[in-house]
Image: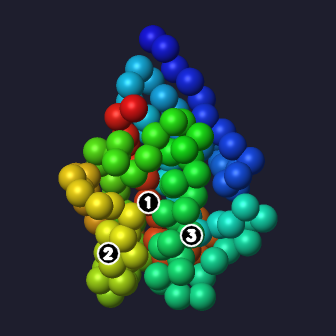
Amino acid sequence: MNITIINTADVPAPIGPYSQAVKSGNMLFLSGQVALDTDGNLVMESIKAETHQVMKNISILLKEAGAGFENIVKTTIFLTDMAFFAEVNEAYGSYFKTNFPARETVAVKGLPKNVNVEISVIAVV
């Protein structure tokens, strides 16, 4: 099995024993991203700003793996409150032009660093 670990200093380092992304064959698995900027600061002025930072981190990891949003086939969005759904959906949706990926959105009790949103991604490259 051909596995490539993908890490970049352009997004915050993992806060646990996991890789930022793993490529296996033509499949790319991105670990859940939260709204940490490259300096490790939380971006939480609003749920939209938080979501945009998450998507920025995803974009950087995709690029590092030679992919883009058009390669994403599946996402999972974790929210601490479903009241955020509409605003997260609007910010998230602005990154996709056509052929939206499959997705689920799950309400959770809490997320790392007390953020409100975390998004993980599966892509084909």
Distance of mark 2 from mark 3, alpha carbons?
A: 14 Å
Q: Nearer the viewer, residue 94 or 113?
A: 94
**Nearest to viewer (mark 1 / mark 2):** 2
Q: Position of residue 60 (x, y in %)?
A: 58, 51
Neighbor class of circle 2 (other Cα within 10 Å; few <14, some 14-19, many 20+) is some
Disc nearer the start of the sequence (2/3): 3
Crowding around mark 3 (Cα neighbors within 10 Å: few <14, some 14 to 19, many 20+) is: many
Residue lying at 44% horizontally and 60% vertically, measured from the top left: 119
Out of 49 and 77, give the one closest to the viewer: 49
Q: CA distance from mark 3 to mark 1?
A: 11 Å
- The residue beneath circle 1 is 119
Residue at point 39%, 51% (across, down): 69
Which x, y percent locates residue 38?
A: 73, 61
The answer to whether any part of residue 15 appears in the image is no
Q: Nearer the viewer, mark 3 or mark 1?
A: 3
Dot 3 or dot 1: first in sequence order is 3
Residue on which the image places disc 2: 89
> Quick check: can you spot residue 16?
yes
Amino acid carrying mark 3 in the image: Gln
